[in-house]
Image (cartoon, rainbow, N blue to C red):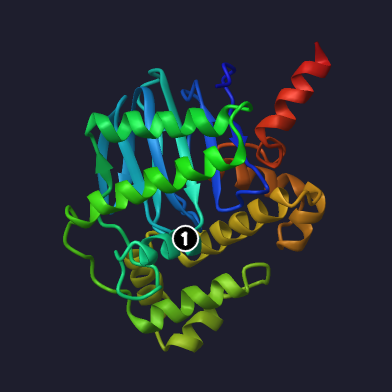
Amino acid sequence: MPQSCGPFFWRDPRMPYVELRVVREGRKVCYAPHSHLQWSLGAITEGCSTFVYQEKEVLVTAGTLVMMNPQWVHACNPVDNQPWGYLMLYIDANWLTQLRFDAGLLGSCHWQDITTSVIREPQWFDGYCQLADCLLDDSRVLLDKQVAVVEYLSALFFELADSQEPRLAAVPQKLQKLADYIRIHAADDVSLDSLCEQSGYSPGHLVRAFKQYFGLTPHAYLLNCRVQLGQHALKQGQPIAQTALELGFADQAHFQRTFKRLVAATPKQYRQSLPEQQIQRTQCK
């Protein structure tokens, strides 16, 4: 397990469906409201933080797990400059859907949101930390890591199947179409006028309704989509300047500011996986 403050990102191209973020000292790690394409499962390993999700703010302390559905807006930030450390797993939603379907937990192979957002039982936290240790251990072979991921997530989702909270109201079809349009055209210059024309909503009603169901204004949602696309491009090794240009940002500096505000890491930090960071630190000694 890395001892530096981080953030560190563990990835393995042989396991593209999972990514692990490690933050040992999170007092300066602050997020604006954002969402991920993946299903996310975090563990508070030290201190405490505020967890904003489903229009609620909860204080979460060491030993707590938090989980976020794909595209659900959330934020987790330190409390009064107190120490805070955490781990965060990002699991590909399609891969996880197949896992749940194969286990008989879904009636069809389509993503189904998890309404439970906080778990405080020690056995699930301890199991999570053991899984993270396994992924970060260079001496563990690929099969060992793959089995650890499948075993832990399968057991967790069987547990969640019996403890789901009431479902939230479905997003109206018009608003979902607008969100899909913004996602598809995230790199373009999308206007409020065009969104109103497509939906028939007035500007004021559209902004209020969109934020009610997606937790972000249309503009904030577009920036979030651009950053998600940027994360994918950077993981493929694409240059930062090229990524900024292709995603429609005014310049690289604008991209870097927006990226850091939503990801709480610079594009350069995110682009490097943990093994690369370890190699570079060794070379600098």
Q: Residue 155 placed where, x, y %?
A: 31, 47
The residue closer to the viewer here, 234 or 97, is: 97
Quadrant of the image occupied by residue 247: bottom right
In the image, what residue type sits under mark 1? Answer: Ala
User: Residue 28's x, y, as percent?
Assistant: 51, 25
Quadrant where the C terminus lies? top right
Q: Is residue 59 left or right of residue 224?
A: left
- Residue 32 showing in the rendered view: no
Look at the picture and state if 122 lies above or below 42: above
Q: Residue furthest top?
A: 285
Q: Is residue 2 above or below residue 109?
A: above
**Label 1: few (<14), some or many (≥20) within 10 Å?**
many
Q: Could you tell whether 62 is left or right of 4 in the image?
A: left
Give me the residue at 51% from left, 76% from top: 180
The percent position of residue 85, horizontal first and vertical second, equals 44, 24
Toward the viewer: 128 or 116? 128
Residue name at image x 72 percent, y 49 percent: 234
Is 175 above or below relative to 4? below
Name the residue at 61% across, 47% down.
258
For label 1, the residue is: 93
Dot 1 lies on which element? helix
Q: Position of residue 98 (x, y in %)?
A: 44, 65
In the image, 178 versus 142, the foreground residue is: 142
Q: Residue at x 76, y 55 (%)?
A: 243
Question: Does the rendering let one see residue 84?
Answer: yes
169 vs 218, left or right, is left
Of residue 140 and residue 122, the one placed in the foreground of this image is 140
